[in-house]
Image: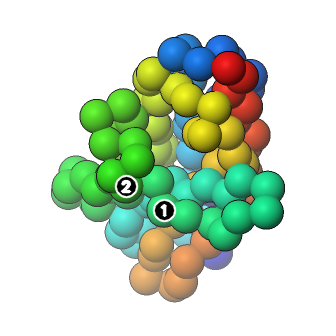
């Protein structure tokens, strides 16, 4: 098993920035893609951004140009730098690790953006 743990959430005003981290522990030797998802109250969980082991990156249209994802394979840690935050970015942000043994989710970290 892999245990992803998110950190870095908080409350900011619109236009502000936050950096989220996801640290994976456990059976980490075959982590493939690491991704961020988010879920706002009353809405379905949605994809935000992902990064493959070789560094290829993927973004949802709603965050492209504002969010930057990165990864440290040696530390099994993924980051997302979130700039120019908007109230609609308010959500619980979840880390997902896609591994040879399955998909694993973290518990989430809350991001709140006020106008």
Element type at marker 2?
Answer: loop
Residue, disc 1: 47
Percent coordinates x, y for residue 95 in the rendering: 58, 56
Mark 1: give few (<14), some (14-19) or many (20+) Cα within 10 Å: some
Q: Is residue 12 visible?
A: yes
Residue located 36% across and 69% down the image: 32
Quadrant the C terminus occupies: top right
Q: Secondary structure at mark 1?
A: strand
Q: Position of residue 59 (x, y in %)?
A: 33, 52
Residue 93 falls left or right of residue 52: right
- Circles 1 and 2: CB atoms closer than 8 Å: yes
Residue 111 lies in quadrant: top right
Q: Which mark is residue 60?
A: 2
Residue 106 percent across, percent down from the top left:
69, 59
Q: Farthest residue to the bottom: give it.
A: 101
Residue 103, position as x, y percentages in the image: 55, 77
Say if residue 28 shows up in the picture.
no
Residue at 36% over, 31% down: 66
Q: Which is nearer the N-term, disc 1 or disc 2?
A: 1
Q: Residue at x 47, y 29 (%)?
A: 82
Answer few, some or many: residues within 10 Å of disc 2's Cα (few below 14, many 20 plus, some between 14 and 19): some
Look at the image and name its color scheme. rainbow
Q: Quadrant of residue 26?
A: bottom right
Number of numbered discs overlaid on the protein picture: 2
In front of the other: 77 or 87: 87
- Near-viewer residue (56 or 41): 41
Q: Could you tell me which residue is drawn at 68 percent across and 57 percent down?
A: 39
User: Alpha carbon of mark 1 to alpha carbon of mark 2: how far?
Assistant: 7 Å
Vertical relation: 25 (above or below) 32: above
Q: Horizontally, is 9 left or right of 82 in the view?
A: right
Is residue 115 placed above or below 40 in the rendered structure? above
């Amino acid at each position: 098993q892999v245990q992803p743990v998110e950190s870095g959430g908080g409350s900011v005003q619109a236009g502000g920035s936050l950096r989220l981290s996801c640290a994976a522990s456990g059976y980490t030797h075959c982590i493939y893609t690491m991704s961020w998802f988010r879920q706002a109250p009353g809405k379905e969980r949605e994809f935000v951004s992902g990064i493959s082991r070789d560094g290829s990156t993927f973004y949802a249209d709603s965050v492209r140009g504002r969010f930057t994802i990165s990864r440290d394979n040696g530390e099994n840690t993924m980051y997302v730098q979130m700039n120019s935050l908007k109230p609609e970015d308010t959500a619980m942000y979840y880390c997902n690790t896609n591994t040879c043994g399955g998909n694993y989710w973290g518990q989430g970290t809350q991001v709140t953006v006020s106008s």
